[in-house]
Image (cartoon, helix red, strand yellow):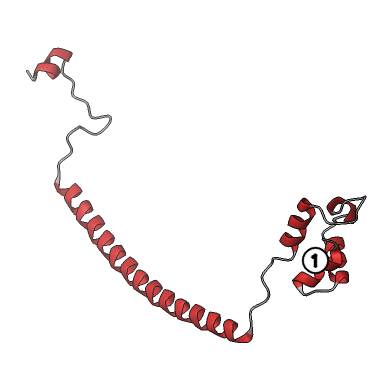
Amino acid sequence: MNIKTFANQKGISPQAVYKKLNQHGIQLSTITNADTGSITPDGEAVLNKLFSQPKPAGAHQLKDTIASLQTEIASLKTENEALRARVRELETERDWLRGQNTELLTRIPPALPAPGQTEKRGLLARLFGK
């Protein structure tokens, strides 16, 4: 197979093949056999890879894609609003719990004396409570 045959199979011109090779910096000598001028199996794989990229979608496909994305955006906006409402609920609950915590801490007497207010008793009296 040569470049012309490959181009005919793909429905493109041989010039398009040469142009694509130049765009990607591929030398013709690296994909063809120097003696026969035919494309090597590795060269054919390279060409197939270069020309296997999908063609742009038609207008109808684009409209369908846009419609599905708009639907997804609308559902995400709804989900976002629900999550914001839940965050507000959790913040209210957090604030209430902080208030309860503060109230409980004021009711509990301190278990240890404040720093600098140590008792003037001996070690054994403090240990055994006498």
Q: Position of residue 23 (x, y in %)?
A: 84, 63
| Residue beneath the point at 28% across and 61% down | 95
**What residue did someone put label 1 on?**
6
Horizontal side of 94 relative to 4 (left or right) equals left
Pick the residue in front: 11 or 74.
11
The part of the image, by quadrant, that contains residue 122 is: top left
Q: Position of residue 114 (x, y in %)?
A: 24, 34
Residue at the limit of the structure toward the right, as seen here? 35
The image shows a total of numbered marks equal to 1
The part of the image, by quadrant, that contains residue 89 is: bottom left
| Residue beneath the point at 86% across and 54% down | 32
Which quadrant: the N terminus?
bottom right
| Residue beneath the point at 14% across and 19% down | 126
Q: Look at the numbered disc 1 and give the secondary structure of its residue.
A: helix
Q: Position of residue 118 (x, y in %)?
A: 22, 26
Q: Residue 66, relative to residue 15: is it above or below?
A: below
Q: Position of residue 37 (x, y in %)?
A: 90, 56
